[in-house]
């Protein structure tokens, strides 16, 4: 009995002696300090940003030099807002949001304060945003009280368990998380209202009462009037795509939708994979155009699939989808896109698309018509 006890004690001592050095070694060498975890830092990427303000029947003769200059100035301001974020080391997600917020506050564009009206005389805005580094996404549809729908889409992504929220519930959520809420009259512009009235009268549909809180009838904004004859084929959606110095990409899109639309109609802008998509494995895309066709084709994801799975250069992939696949469905519009390795592309099958882009260290470029680079 005594001998057995001594054997057990000796064995226990041997085991303890073996474990002690191992424990000491483990505690003195944390996992993060193991050679396998030491990686050579990736080379810094050169940032890039592209923005768009919609596509459609946009022609020199109809727009004129004064309006053209105004649109270019607004696009420049939006691109510069995003570039400032990127140049200070900020994220692609922050840059996309910053650029789109500028366009949402500009009544020249069909988003935010320049949003068109539904057939009931209300502004119903849609937006989405996507982080290419982790495939997180957020979207909102039919909102009317949050000043910046793009910020609300980001809040849905980062502060809720959801990808999409709609209507009053989405606006209420925005208020709870501290986003600026405004009276619906904040989004009213005389030009957009007069456009709606003319369209409904022409189509023999009833004209709704002037919205409560709207200012008394007055002169319309001269620049905004230029495109009224082509309004039915002009898609004023705004969007941005960005690449930051960490090599991450992001995309965002925001719109007031289709003028005179049936209340509750939602287009492609808040649909992840249709109007917006971003993945570090492929590309980032923001689209503008005839939403129903973009949804059916899944335009944004379709372009990225061609890049990721077929190895197409970005410009070729974008052209393939917009000029072949989309046109085969009789859809029209355009996209802006970029990749983590710095490829930039934009393409459209309409007479024009409001657009701007800049690479780190390069000159900011703007374009409107289809005969510009």
Image (cartoon, rainbow, N blue to C red):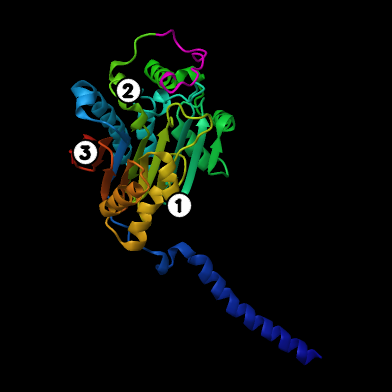
Q: What stretch is highlighted in magenta?
A: 201-217
- Picture disc at residue 103: none
Crowd tier of the residue under label 3, counting other residues whose Cα lies within 10 Å: few below 14, some 14–19, many 20 or above: some
Q: How far apart are marks 3 and 1 (CA)?
A: 35 Å
In the image, residue 316 above or below residue 240: below
Q: Is residue 210 magenta?
A: yes
Q: What element carries label 2?
A: helix
The residue lying toward the viewer, choosing from 106 and 248, is 106
Q: Looking at the magenta stretch, what is its main secondary structure? A: loop
Where is residue 293? Give x, y as percent. Answer: 41, 44
The image position of residue 330, as x and y in percent, is 35, 44
The question of residue 202 being in magenta is answered with: yes
Position of 11 relative to 166 (above/below) = below
Name the quarter where the C terminus is drawn. top left
Q: How far apart are marks 2 and 1 (CA)?
A: 41 Å
Image position of 82 with respect to 299: above or below:
above
Residue beneath label 2, please? 228
Q: Residue 63 placed where, x, y %?
A: 23, 25
Q: Of residues 33 and 115, which is closer to you in this image?
A: 115
Q: Residues within 10 Å of mark 2 (few under 14, many from 20)?
A: some
Q: What residue sits 32% from the left and 23% below the top? A: 228
Which numbered circle lies on residue 134? 1
| Residue at 34% over, 57% down | 306
Q: Could you say where residue 267 lies in the image, as x and y percent from the top left? A: 46, 38
- Can residue 69 be seen in the rendering of this structure? no
Q: Name the residue under label 3.
A: 370
* SS at mark 3 in the image: loop
- In the visual, does 154 lie left or right of 358? right
Sequence order check, earlier mark of 2 and 1: 1
Instruction: Tell me the mark number nearer the camera, choosing from 3 and 1.
Output: 3
């Amino acid at each position: 009995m005594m001998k057995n006890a001594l054997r057990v004690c000796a064995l226990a001592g041997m085991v303890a002696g073996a474990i002690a050095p191992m424990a000491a070694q483990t505690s003195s060498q944390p996992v993060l300090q193991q050679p396998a975890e030491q990686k050579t830092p990736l080379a810094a990427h050169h940032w890039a940003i592209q923005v768009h303000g919609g596509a459609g029947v946009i022609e020199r003769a109809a727009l004129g030099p004064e309006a053209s200059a105004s649109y270019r100035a607004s696009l420049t301001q939006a691109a510069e807002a995003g570039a400032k974020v990127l140049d200070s080391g900020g994220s692609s997600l922050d840059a996309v949001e910053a650029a789109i917020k500028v366009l949402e506050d500009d009544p020249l564009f069909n988003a935010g304060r320049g949003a068109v009206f539904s057939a009931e005389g209300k502004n119903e805005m849609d937006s989405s945003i996507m982080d290419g580094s982790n495939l997180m996404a957020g979207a909102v549809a039919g909102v009317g009280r949050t000043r910046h729908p793009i910020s609300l889409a980001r809040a849905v992504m980062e502060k809720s368990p959801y990808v999409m929220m709609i209507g009053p519930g989405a606006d209420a959520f925005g208020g709870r998380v501290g986003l600026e809420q405004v009276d619906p009259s904040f989004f009213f512009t005389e030009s957009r209202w007069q456009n709606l009235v003319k369209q409904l009268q022409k189509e023999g549909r009833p004209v709704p009462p002037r919205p409560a809180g709207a200012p008394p009838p007055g002169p319309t904004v001269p620049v905004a009037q230029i495109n009224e004859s082509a309004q039915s084929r002009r898609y004023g959606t705004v969007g941005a795509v960005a690449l930051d110095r960490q090599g991450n990409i992001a995309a965002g899109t925001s719109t007031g939708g289709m003028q005179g639309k049936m209340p509750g109609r939602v287009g492609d802008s808040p649909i992840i994979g249709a109007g917006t998509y971003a993945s570090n494995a492929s590309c980032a895309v923001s689209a503008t155009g005839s939403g129903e066709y973009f949804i059916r084709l899944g335009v944004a994801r379709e372009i990225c699939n061609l890049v990721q799975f077929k190895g197409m250069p970005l410009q070729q992939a974008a052209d393939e989808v917009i000029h072949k696949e989309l046109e085969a469905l009789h859809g029209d519009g355009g996209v802006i896109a970029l990749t983590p390795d710095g490829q930039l592309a934009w393409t459209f099958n309409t007479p024009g698309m409001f657009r701007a882009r800049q690479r780190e260290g390069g000159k900011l470029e703007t374009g409107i018509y289809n005969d510009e680079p």
